[in-house]
Image (cartoon, grey):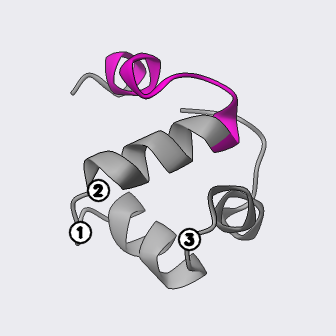
């Protein structure tokens, strides 16, 4: 998903650590429902929309 955000900006907006964002991006960690909701909020969309856009 392209949103023109750096990992740092996304981490700040979603109130997550930069390290955790990187781990999710690299497929080393799976995001919890709470994390999906936080990430979606950072992108200004719903959790359901985020999952649809990522093909999950």
Q: Residue at x 43, y 28 (%)?
A: 47
Magenta range is: 42-53
Q: In the figure, is residue 29 to the left or right of 23? A: left
Quick one: label 3, few (<14), some, or many (20+) residues within 10 Å? some
Earlier in the chain: of badge 3 and badge 1, it is 3
Q: Residue 16 shows which numbered tag?
A: 3
Q: Position of residue 24 (x, y in %)?
A: 35, 63
Quarter location, residue 50: top left
Residue named by callout 2: 31
Distance CA(mark 3)–CA(mark 1): 13 Å
Q: Can you identify the residue that label 1 sits on?
A: 29
Q: CA distance from mark 2 to mark 1?
A: 6 Å
Q: Of circles 3 and 1, which is in front?
A: 3
Q: What residue is drawn where x is 53% and y is 32%?
A: 1
Q: Could you tell me residue 16's position as x and y percent?
A: 56, 71
Residue that appears at 34% across and 16% down: 52
The residue that appears at 51% across and 22% down in the rendered structure is: 46
Under tag 1, what secondary structure? loop
Q: Quadrant of the C terminus?
A: top left
């Amino acid at each position: 998903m392209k949103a023109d955000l750096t990992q740092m900006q996304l981490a700040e907006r979603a109130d997550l650590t930069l390290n955790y964002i990187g781990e999710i991006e690299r497929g080393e960690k799976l995001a919890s429902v709470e994390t999906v909701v936080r990430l979606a909020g950072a992108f200004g969309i719903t959790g359901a929309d985020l999952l649809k856009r990522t093909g999950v």
